[in-house]
Amino acid sequence: MSDVKKNILEIKDLVVHYDTEGGVVRAANGINIKIGQKESLGLVGETGAGKTTTALSILRIIPDPPGKIISGSIMVDGVDLMSFTEEEMEGIRGKEVSMIFQDPMTALNPVFTVGEQIAESIQIHEQVSAHEAMERAKEMLEIVGIHRERASDYPHQLSGGMKQRVVIAIALACHTKLLIADEPTTALDVTIQAQVLELIKEYRETYQTSMLMITHDLGIVAEICDCVAVMYAGNIVEYGTLDDVFNHTLHPYTEGLFSSLPNINQRTARLTPIPGAMPDPTELPEGCAFAPRCAYATEECRKLEQSDQTVSETHMVRCSRYREPEFKIKRGNMP
Amino acid sequence: MFRYVIKRCLLMIPIMIAVSFIVYFIIDLTPGDSVDAQYPELTATEKEELREELGLNDSVVVRYARYMAGVLRGDMGTSSTYNDSAFKIYMKRLPATLELAFWGIFVAMLIAIPFGILAARKQNTWIDSSSMFFGLLGLSIPNFWLGLMLIMVFSLQLGWLPSFADGTWRSIILPAITIGTGQAALLIRTTRSSMLEVIRQDYLRTARAKGVSERKVIYHHALRNALIPIITAAGSQFSVSLGGAVVTETVFAWPGVGRLIIDSINTRDEAMVVGSIILTTMLSSIVILGVDILYAFVDPRIKARYSK
Amino acid sequence: MVKKQAAQTANPKTEFQRINYLSELWRDFKKNKGAVIGLIVLCIIVFFAILSEFMFDYETQVIAINVSEMLQWPSSKHLFGTDNFGRDILIRLLYGARYSLSIGVCSVAVSLLIGSSLGVIAGYFGGLVETAIMRVMDVFSPIPSMLLAVCLTTAFGRGIVVLMVAIGVVGIPAFAQIARASVMTIRDQEYIEAARACGSREIQIILFHIIPNALAPIMVQATLRIASAIGTASALTFLGLGVPTPMPEWGGMLSDGRNFIRDYSYMTLFPGLAIMITVLSINMIGDGLRDAMDPRLKR
């Protein structure tokens, strides 16, 4: 998963809470992530699992109040961002690490042209003239597949797919080392989805950018990621390479995710969803958060605080049942 | 875009005609007329003869038609007080009022925008509540009283500022503060609610993720969007201040059209009163139209809609 | 409010529902401390407005000229001092409350009744009726309200009733707009269809369904307009166009005091304070009402 060279991103034991009227939302409870150079990690999970929180923490743009990073370290290219001042973080955002968001319809400022919005990113981080910044902005537009003349257009004059490509252009304008993509294709048509993913893939190949891709779609993960981290209720429950997680699935939740995918080869009358729902993040249970919905849960599971079990050099699972040497889930292990 | 402007201008014409009739009709109801005012020494019979001669005994509709015919020629009647074209005198006094209204809005924005932004950023804290309260206070203070109090303190007691238009730049300060304080109230409220809407928008998050400093996020990215309803509110406030100028100009003995109207009422100068009110109304409508057009320029989405 | 109605069948609001709504409103209103203080202050002012008729003799205390007591600074004998006619300012202020309050309330009553009726009719019947009414409103709207009031008071002379009517007329377009907008929102709601389906007559529909729901924004607007009407009335009196002397209207008292501002500043201080406190307390009540009625702020 990573060699002796510095990892582009290393998150250790990240804990993030939101202090709301309804209680303290424990959004992230000890997240560990490593992404090496040129690697991409898919962060998978349902809505509310804590994926976006993790991503926003890297850039430290969690709305505060009510959000707070309680503890943990976030290292980008060997440097711990937690010690940075706000001004220093501004230097990081858009330059070393950049982010693209889910909804392109609201992500762009309606009163500035798309060219201006891309150029702004360049002007903040690099010492260039306004003219040159705009030139480079137009180049970025071409890279993402939009005619350079459209730099003087306003967001409302572009389609949803084009808007998302502008958002990507903004994020990549300074050729960052790490791109965080928070469900970039969820709000788009399927055909546009494919185009956007293609664009990201090509860009990464050309510029060797590392990527953290947040998604709930396992198909996208399969297409574009090297490694996978599955998140549930604020914890990463399984972590490994594509092969590890897809072909040697360990965690019951991951198994549930795969089972709930419709399989074109198996025409069944009913799909198999995971029963129940994610627990209320203000009232997480003592033991395993997934236990109430888990087919393999024991009494111990419900009471014991879970810990990470390393199964191989690349593969980790957070399930106490794996302490039993003979424990296996159904997926991948049926005759 | 151009067609929209033309359409709005054309629409103004019938409205202004109706307005002018209403104003003419109402003022006409005032007891007494210009004959009484200008020639008090004549006997009743002589006055009647004069009225016949001048056509003052015709019905109000006929007289109005005559008046409008004159207006189309550029003649809004002769002021009995100044013995000169009413239109000319109004135009001479207008700049003073415009100066007052402009600086009033300026002061109002100067107060309202920073406090409105502050109240929005610290929503539901004591800063928010007190900003709103001070806004409400500014609205409740009768502005002629505020003017008098300011004169009392700054002119009479301290002697720092003049209490009337003495030709120096200092004379605009107290009147501007007087007008501005009252208008700031509505503008603080508008700024605050507009900023609250904008502050939760996603595109601000995009800006932060780009590395834009928080100050720039608020004052450049957010404010530019929040400004639109604020400008509209400021425009309508301008119209209100044209009416309120009547009072402020009286307090500060300001040589503008507001005081012109009051003086003309006292001297029973009908032509002046009617002309001034019609022209002021027209000015107010033009400003509101101007603000609407400005709105279209500031918000590219509106501009697009009207360009189709 | 609207959702509750929709859940019920097409029956006129029962007494129980009305009482429930009012007590809920009161509870939300109470949360706003400023509004409650405003209400208390207003009650005190109203108290004096009503009782001053009995507490003070108009002829001897309010308007009588008393040369020996002229222009005295505030003292234990005259708490707010005396004016240039030797009249006690505090007594005049307390008595003067009745003018401001009555003009405020009556003028808004005129605006509200006429304006809202026109607005409801316009909104409900639509078509030519609506166009005609709204065009007339459009003609009155561009005239700055102060100027229109000046116009009317000039034509009809000084006096309390003229003032009430003038300020009332100025306020008609605003209420017409609000009423019409409310009606248009409500008239297309489903429970009106249901009412018609049950055979309710048009007038019943208007009275029992449309008006109660349109009431909220109108009430807020009415309260705020009372505050501004008091301000306008005092401004007009200040200019010499409103309540004639020697009646102790606050704006008029300010106008009197203006000539003595250099040496007898108390003459301008107190009437202005009176206007400010009255207007402020009504504004705070209006603010509280607006927040209490705002559905977005509900739990």
Image: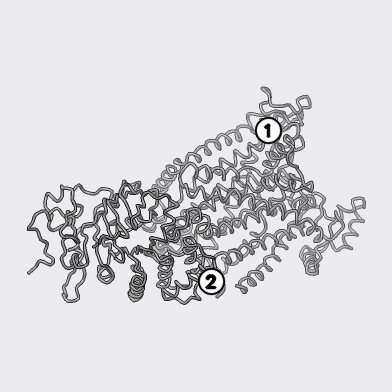
Q: Of helix, strand and loop, which one carries label 1?
A: helix
Residue C56 image offset from top left, x and y in percent: 66, 29
Q: In this view, does C112 lie to the left or right of B252?
A: left
Q: Quadrant of the N terminus of chain B?
A: bottom right
Q: Residue furthest top?
A: C76
Q: Is residue C91 left or right of residue C12?
A: right
Task: Find residue A38 and report its image quarter.
Answer: bottom left
Per the image, the residue denoted by label 2 is B305
Query: How does the figure colour the protein chain or chains?
Result: one colour
Provide the chain ID for the residue under circle 1.
C
Give the residue type that dot 1 points to.
Arg
Examine the rendered structure and indicate whether residue C52 appears above or below residue B76. above
Q: Which of A229 and A10 is in front in this view?
A: A10
Is residue A31 in sight in this rendering?
yes
Is residue B197 in sight in this rendering?
no
Q: In this view, does A318 lie to the left or right of B35?
A: left
Residue C174 image offset from top left, x and y in percent: 58, 56
Q: Circle 1: is it few (<14), some (14-19), or many (20+) Cα within 10 Å?
A: many
Q: Residue C24, labelled with which disc?
A: none
Give the residue type that dot 2 points to.
Arg
Examine the rendered structure and indicate whether residue B8 appears above or below residue B245. below
Q: Which of A220 and C191 is in front in this view?
A: A220
Q: Residue furthest front?
A: A4
Which of the two discs, 1 and 2, sits closer to the camera? Answer: 2
Q: Of helix, strand and loop, which one carries label 2?
A: helix
Q: Nearer the viewer, residue A268 or B266?
A: A268
Q: Residue at x 44, y 75 (%)?
A: A142
Q: Residue C92, labelled with which disc?
A: 1
